[in-house]
Image (cartoon, helix red, strand yellow):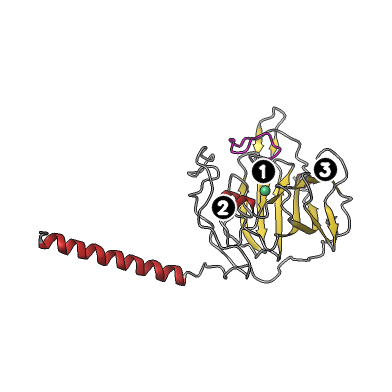
Amino acid sequence: MKSNFFIQNEMNMQARALAFLAVLAMSSYSSPAQAPPPAAGAAAPREQIEGFKEHLIAGSKWYQHDPDRPQPPIVTPGAAFSQAAPPPSDAELLFDGKDLSKWQTMSGQPAPWKVQDGYVEVTGRNDIRTKGTWADFQLHVEFLEPNPPGNLHGQSRGNSGIMINNMYEVQVLDSYNDKTYADGQAGGIYGQMPPLVNASRPPGEWQTYDIIWESPRWNAQKELVQKACITVLHNGVVIQHRTELIGSTDGIGGGVAWRGVSKYTPHEPPVFVALQTHNANPVRFRNIWIRDLHVAERQ
Ligand code: MG
């Protein structure tokens, strides 16, 4: 027979459990960060987060691709911001919706992606890159995630990327109502820094990235004297604020294998911009323009 002490203790535990469940129910119901429900036909959100815990990121308490790194808060972006913005007068229009004459494959062949109806869609296994290079720039890119996303989640869901010099990637992904490791979601500096917030629009809606990039610099002795620095606005919301990169993104062309430890490899400051094919996920792009900031010339 249980003593009064144990019976009372059990009752307290049950009460605490009920209270905890009640708080949980209320908090999940009333959270202001909840995104609108997915559109009809969209796949249900998945709570399980893929990821790895192999290498601590330099200067961080989190592992590269850490599934436990907190998911950035969801922010619903405002009106269109820079969407469909005509390029400023000193910008170079890189894609006007008609042709890819400013682009090529990594090996210098004509860019093979499909252009139609004012956009270009990732096609096949070739990344494409600009023919031009810039050391420090403001880049405007618009992208659209496949809709419906099908039963795809995480890194398989509308994956592409803005790959600067094929070394540093700003992730392009459908992170609307879908989770992946935080440093690999939309607007993440892949494998290094999650976005400050998740400002994703639903798949099937055009989104914008406005990227301000400063190339890394090395001295004559090939010593790194300035890390790469990036600021990113996603749909008008600041998601990277003067983020210093710790080196090349893992898993693209910068000499760091996927899930490998990021490091810098010296290169000239002028860099090209590449768009990534990730298993030919049919992500679309339009209205791409760039402004050279001429930073070095003013120093
Ligand atoms: Mg990518």
Task: Check mark 2 vs ligand 1: CB closer than 8 Å? yes or no.
Answer: no
According to the picture, the residue beneath numbered tag 1 turns out to be 228
> How many numbered markers are drawn?
3
Separation (CA) of disc 3 from disc 1: 24 Å
Q: In this view, does 25 lie to the left or right of 198?
A: left
Q: Is mark 1 on a helix, strand or loop?
A: loop
Residue 281 sits inside the magenta stretch:
no
Answer yes or no: do the residues labelled 3 and 1 have beta carbons within 8 Å?
Answer: no
Counting residues from the N terminus, which is met first, the one under dot 2 or under dot 1?
2
Q: What element carries label 2?
A: loop
Residue 259 sits inside the magenta stretch:
yes
Identify the amino acid type marked 1. Ala
Q: In this view, does 297 lie to the left or right of 1?
A: right
The residue sitting at 81% across, 44% down in the picture is 133
Q: In this view, does 38 lie above or below 141?
A: below
The residue sitting at 85% across, 47% down in the picture is 111
Quarter of the figure with residue 269? top right
Badge number at residue 105: 3
Badge number at residue 65: none
The x and y percentages for residue 187 are 64, 54
Circle 1 residues within 10 Å: few <14, some 14–19, many ≥20: many
Circle 3 residues within 10 Å: few <14, some 14–19, many ≥20: some
Identify the amino acid type marked 3. Thr
According to the picture, the residue beneath numbered tag 2 turns out to be 180
Quarter of the figure with residue 241? bottom right
Q: In which quarter of the image is the C terminus?
A: top right
The x and y percentages for residue 229 are 65, 46
